[in-house]
Image (tube, rainbow, N blue to C red):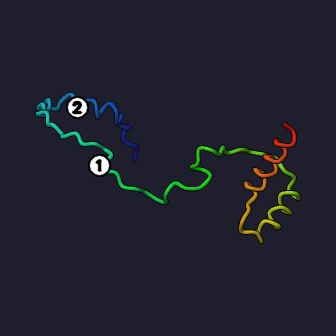
Amino acid sequence: MPKPPEVNKFAQMMANARNLEPLEEKTEQTIPITDPSENRKERGRPATGKRSNNEYASTTVFLKKKTKKAAAQILLNRDDLDLSELLEKLLTDWISKNS
């Protein structure tokens, strides 16, 4: 049985659009403008920590895997210091000695 010829869907859509009556113009509706800050809900957690603090800048450094792992292991048992704070302290001390 022969296959029916394929219909060009775009051409058919255009032909249908030409045959339609023009749409009536819609009357303009006015929407009251409100201050977006009035309807704003707070999302997620509050912005605290180093990432949202303007005094900190995200920095990439290259450390040997062995060095980073050893430091991280030592810092696991400490609640007062993390790797970022340790690097900050070391750099601050180095700057003051070399200034």
Q: Are marks 2 and 1 in contact (CB under 8 Å)?
A: no
Q: Where's residue 16, x and y in %?
A: 23, 33
> How dense is the environment of label 1, judged by Cα within 10 Å: few (below 14), some, or many (20 and up)?
few
Q: CA distance from mark 2 to mark 1?
A: 43 Å
SS label for mark 2: helix
Left-right relation of 72 to 32: right
Question: Which label is found at residue 38?
Answer: 1
The residue nearer to you, when weighing 29 against 14, is: 29
Question: Which label is found at residue 17?
Answer: 2
Residue type for callout 1: Glu
Q: Residue at x 25, y 30 (%)?
A: 15
Left-right relation of 3 to 22: right
Q: Where's residue 47, x and y in %?
A: 52, 54
Question: In terms of sequence position, does the residue under pointer 2 or pointer 1 come before the other?
Answer: 2
Instruction: Give the quarter of the figure containing the C terminus.
Output: top right
> How dense is the environment of label 2, judged by Cα within 10 Å: few (below 14), some, or many (20 and up)?
few
Q: Where's residue 24, x and y in %?
A: 11, 32
